[in-house]
Each structure stands twice: as structure tokens, then as C-alpha cells.
Image (cartoon, rainbow, N blue to C red):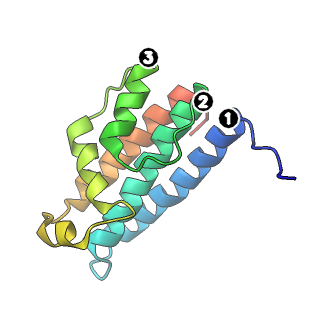
């Protein structure tokens, strides 16, 4: 007998917490030149992916198997949530997703880490409003 799945509001809360952990890694790693862009990009992608999934879960929709940020934006928009974020700049982070494609990372431009941290912070603030959690 399997255990029941957590309700979607609990799923949203957990995803938000996990996204915050990835965002903290981005913020902490950004100033360290010893940590590669691929690591920072991975955590940024993970934070944004989890935050978007938290928004969908808070709206009663589950999409656990999707790692493509642009597709997640489409789902969020489809459920009627307006997204005042730079979708194109965020969608680029998908190249750092799991499963990532190493050949794409070899061709990736260097990350502007300060811009990335600001973008992650912008997504964090927007999601907090969407799902009703304090900063």
C-alpha cells in the first residue's frame, strides 16, 4: 500500500522551500570565481523551475516531469497567471537543466552573475506574491 501524495498546497510549499535553497546557492556561489558558470546556472535553473512548479501546484496543477522553463511559463500562463518576468532570459537557463546536454554548455555564453542573481531575486519576489508566502 503506497502512502498518499501530499496535497498540492503542501507540494507548493515544499517546492518553494527547495527553490529558495537553490537560490541561496546561486547567491553564495556568484561571487566565487572558483565555481563554474555551469554550477551556478544549474542552481538558477533549478530555482526557477521549482518556483514555477510551486505556482502551478498552488493553482491545483501538477507538472513534475517538465524541466523546460519556457514550457513551464506556458503552463503558468494557461492557468491564468500573469508573468511580469523576462521570459526569454529565464528560458535560457533550461540549458543548465537535468538532464543537461554537455555540448550545449560548451557553447553557452558566460553568465553575468550579478544580473543572474538579480533575476533570481526578481522571480523569488514574484512567486512569493503568487503563492502567498512572506519573504
Cβ atoms under marks 3 and 2 closer than 8 Å: no
Q: Is residue 31 visible?
A: no
Asked if disc 2 and disc 1 are in contact, CB closer than 8 Å, the reply is: yes
Q: Position of residue 28 (x, y in %)?
A: 42, 67
Give me the C-alpha separation between circle 1 and circle 3.
17 Å
Q: Position of residue 67 (x, y in %)?
A: 40, 50
**Is residue 133 in view from this perspective?**
yes
Residue behind mark 2: 58
Number of callouts in the render? 3
Answer with mark 1 or mark 3, whichever residue precedes in sequence: 1
Left/right of residue 93 with respect to residue 132 in the rendered view? left
Residue at 41 percent of width and 29 percent of height: 75
Name the one closer to the observer, 132 or 4: 4
Residue 118 percent location from the top left of the image: 31, 48
Circle 3 is placed at which residue position? Answer: 80
Q: In the displayed image of the protein, which residue is found farthest to the front?
A: 1
State the residue lying farthest toward the right.
1
Q: Residue at x 28, y 53 (%)?
A: 93
Q: Is residue 88 left or right of residue 5?
A: left
Q: Which residue is mark 1?
A: 8
Location of residue 77 by image quarter: top left
Q: Residue at image x 34%, y 66%?
A: 40
Disc 1, SS:
helix
Q: Can you say whether 92 is above or below 11 in the image? A: below
Which type of secondary structure does the marked residue at label 2 adopt? helix
N-term-proximal mark, 2 vs 1:
1
Which image quadrant is residue 101 in? bottom left
Amino acid at each position: 500500500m503506497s502512502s498518499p501524495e501530499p496535497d498540492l498546497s503542501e507540494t507548493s510549499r515544499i517546492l518553494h522551500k527547495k527553490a529558495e535553497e537553490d537560490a541561496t546557492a546561486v547567491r553564495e556561489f556568484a561571487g566565487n570565481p572558483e565555481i563554474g558558470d555551469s554550477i551556478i546556472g544549474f542552481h538558477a535553473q533549478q530555482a526557477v523551475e521549482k518556483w514555477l512548479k510551486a505556482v502551478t501546484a498552488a493553482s491545483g496543477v501538477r507538472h513534475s516531469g517538465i524541466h523546460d522553463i519556457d514550457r513551464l511559463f506556458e503552463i503558468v500562463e494557461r492557468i491564468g497567471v500573469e508573468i511580469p518576468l523576462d521570459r526569454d532570459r529565464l528560458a535560457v537557463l533550461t540549458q543548465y537543466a537535468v538532464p543537461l546536454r554537455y555540448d550545449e554548455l560548451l557553447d553557452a555564453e558566460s553568465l553575468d552573475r550579478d544580473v543572474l542573481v538579480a533575476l533570481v531575486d526578481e522571480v523569488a519576489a514574484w512567486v512569493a506574491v503568487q503563492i502567498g508566502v512572506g519573504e
